[in-house]
Amino acid sequence: GPKKFDFDINEISYTPQRATAVTFSNSYYDVQQALVALKSSPIATKHSSAQLKTYVYGDQVGTTSLAFITSQIQPTAQPKVFQTLNDVKQALQTKQIAALVTDTPTAQFISSSEIPGTKMVAQFPSTGEHYGLLFSKGNPLVGCVNKAIATLKSNGTLQQLQK
């Protein structure tokens, strides 16, 4: 529906399903998912592909991270689904789940600043997921923003900001 903003730049991943309801700009950041766990958890040191399948994960409903868990990690136990990321983080702290999956910048922030005693255990290869600015469906500003993103990519600004 109608938005009370011109665009939202808030680490929003493009998905074909989301693009049916809104318009996305071109990519400004290629997303990699990362795994966050308690440092004392077995997953912190035992995380081969086969071992990852044996743990209980949790994530927020409707996220690309939850989809990543089910499609890429393919754990034997169904992931626990929570309403908010704060609920997921609390489940990690109370050991209801072994780990959570989120985009790498969020994983770095959680493990360095939000939850003491956690670490970013692993970073997964990109599956093509990327962030785009979100606009109301058909907003003509997307063309101008795509030109700006192209300039920021070509002159190296986006790469410098990522570093």
Image: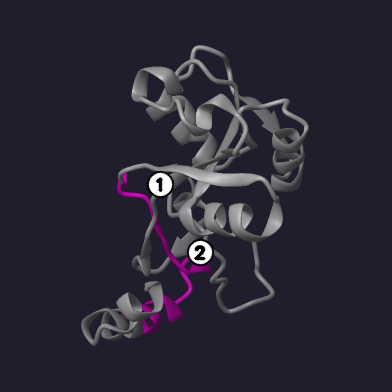
Q: Is residue 142 above or below residue 86?
A: below
Most extreme residue toward the left, as rendered?
154
Residue 65 x %, y %? 51, 40
Q: Tag 1, which secondary structure?
A: loop
Q: Which residues are magenta?
A: 126-146
Magenta-span inclusion, residue 27? no
Give the residue pinned by disc 2.
137
Residue 157 x %, y %? 32, 84
Most extreme residue toward the top, as rendered?
76
Q: Is residue 133 above or below residue 114?
A: below
Residue at horizontal 77%, vertical 40%? 90
Residue at horizontal 47%, vertical 30%? 45
Labels 2, 1: front one: 1
Residue at horizontal 57%, vertical 67%? 10
Q: Tag 2, which secondary structure?
A: loop
Viewed as shown, does residue 24 lie left or right of 146?
A: right
Mark 2 → mark 1, Cα distance in angstroms: 13 Å
Residue 22 x %, y %? 51, 59
- Which one is in front, 130 or 55? 55
Q: Quadrant of the N terminus?
A: bottom right
Tell me the kind of residue under disc 1.
Pro
Give the residue pinned by disc 1.
16
Tell me the kind of residue under disc 2.
Lys
Residue at horizontal 55%, vertical 75%? 7
- Which one is in front, 7 or 51? 51
